[in-house]
Amino acid sequence: MNDSILGISRNEELCAGIYEMTVSSPDGEFSAAPGQFAEIRLRDYFLRRPISIADVCGEKIIFVYKVVGGGTDAMSKMKAGDSIGVMAPLGNGYDIAKADDRPYVIGGGLGVPPMYYLTEKLIESGRRPVVILGYNTSSEMFYSDKFEKLGADVSITTADGSCGLKGFVTDAFPPERPYVFACGPEPMLKAVYDISSAGQFSFEARMGCGFGACMGCSRKMKDGYKRICKEGPVFDREDILW
Amino acid sequence: MVDLRVDLSGMILDNPVIPASGTFGYGKEFAELYDINILGSISFKGTTVEERYGNELPRIAECDAGMINSVGLQNPGLRAVCCSELPALAEVYKKKVIANICGSSTDDYIACAEAMDAQDTVGLIEVNISCPNVHCGGMAFGVDPRTAEKLTKAVKAVSSKPVYMKLSPNVTDITEIARACESGGADGISLINTLLGMRIDIKSKKPVIANKVGGFSGPAIFPVALRMVWETAHAVDIPVMGMGGVDSADKVIEMIMAGASAVQVGAANLTDPFICKKIIEELPERMESLNINNFDEIRGCV
């Protein structure tokens, strides 16, 4: 983990209220596992913002984030050439080696970005992932074309039916229970949990520190309490308690 | 050459900077980032007899220049701390540590104090009678002078090591509690714990924190903490460990000028894991520029 001031090379709106920011690591190649995250420091805000890593490309790190309050609003107004404090990579990411040859990659809403980096890595490893992306509505869709460009088999669901299949990610599931990688709101994770056989699930939480010091984001798992920021955010299906 | 050493009831620290309990775990996460042996000491995560999960999530709320937490003393319990956490900490930290203990009854405090007194790596016991996030015990022992005095006596009776009582700012007159602890035989006073605070999510019309209220910390509370350290240091004849919103070498110096013997750094560890290291590296230069040779020259000068 490093805590550095990084230069922003790009910060643009992808769709209503959702932005993509690219920063560059000064130490050359940046290394992170898919599913790991960063804690971003914003001027005038005491706590950092935990943001998932959407992609890593050499020394470039890409974040996709939604404006949900003052902090992320300030982040959205930053320009190329500005700099930003980034502590990364944090947490425990996805372990690709555990997956079968045709895993299902499930991303819902702001759970989509980390699945892009994961899908890249899965394809690199010779696997043929099936990607299901869920959004509320077509105007909030982003990144679906990027997944297609990777050569993944992509299905889209929208809650209002404005694009793809009307419904939730689980409506695009096959009858057999697949191995899944999932990231999204907790009700989605639970629904995916119920119709999968095995897999890895990434959780969100309001965090204090993001690196395991404050116990602000503990969650009860089968083997006792785990920190979402440290032992997580990614947990194996068999460890999760619902 | 400046001398950074300070004395806490016979426990000599290389410098006055100590990460505060609850913001540094048992040191492991920070030892991965830098050599934590530079720290004056470490006040480890508050330990109770039984394992505690703590409060429901969310436990964290952001504030202007600070944060509210309602972790609720999550810890693995006395046995696990003594058998696993402290030996692991001793691997990465070679100096004496400060054992922060808490309980919901006098017997709990006695059991924790006895166990910590027997630990070689523990140099000092810090008794938390000020946690705002537990429903019974904790702060209840720290808001009434008679109760605080009795508990101090009970803990002192089983401890051969210095006992510091950690006080809550959520009282009318903190010096009254400090004096009661001194009468009970306390070797020193630690202050302040967090201030009770609250935030409301105006969209959901509910408190941000599941426990509704929590402990407010961060740079916003520094002036309040400094004032209480100053009042307390002048009200008692035992050493005072000052804490509350400290995030720079200058604030460490302010705390010592107010009368603190050593200074703890709390919430700042959570937003900058390197903050204690930075403060320790900054201190000699700041002292030189202020013509301070050692902390005895300035302690309580205000």
Image (tube, rainbow, N blue to C red):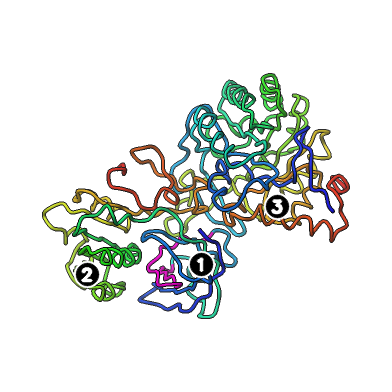
Q: Chain of mark 3?
A: B
Image marks 3 and 2: residues in contact by CB distance under 8 Å: no
Amino acid at circle 3: Phe
Comparing labels 3 and 2, the label whose residue is closer to the camera: 2
Q: Residue at x 18, y 50 (%)?
A: A195
Q: Which mark is residue B73?
A: none
Q: Residue at x 57, y 69 (%)?
A: A5
Q: Which residue is mark 2?
A: A152
Q: CA distance from mark 2 to mark 1?
A: 36 Å
Q: Are marks 3 and 2 on the same chain?
A: no
Element class at badge 2: loop
* Magenta-colored segment: predominant secondary structure: strand
Q: Which residue is mark 3?
A: B222
Quarter-wise, where is residue A141 in the image?
A: bottom left
Q: CA distance from mark 3 to mark 2?
A: 54 Å
Q: Relative to the observer, which residue lies in front, A120 or B225?
A: A120
Element class at badge 1: helix
Which residue appears farthest toward the left when viewing the image?
A: A175
**Label tally:** 3
Q: Position of residue A208 (x, y in %)?
A: 51, 52
Q: CA distance from mark 3 to mark 1?
A: 24 Å
Q: Position of residue B124 (x, y in %)?
A: 69, 32
Q: Residue at x 45, y 46 (%)?
A: B210
Rate crowding at label 1 as few (under 14), some (14 to 19) or many (20 or more) other CA atoms within 10 Å.
Answer: few
- Over which residues does the magenta segment extend? A48-67
Amino acid at circle 1: Gly
Q: Which residue is mark 1?
A: A70
Amino acid at circle 2: Ala
Q: Chain of mark 2?
A: A
Q: Position of residue A79 (x, y in %)?
A: 51, 79
Comparing labels 2 and 1, the label whose residue is closer to the camera: 2
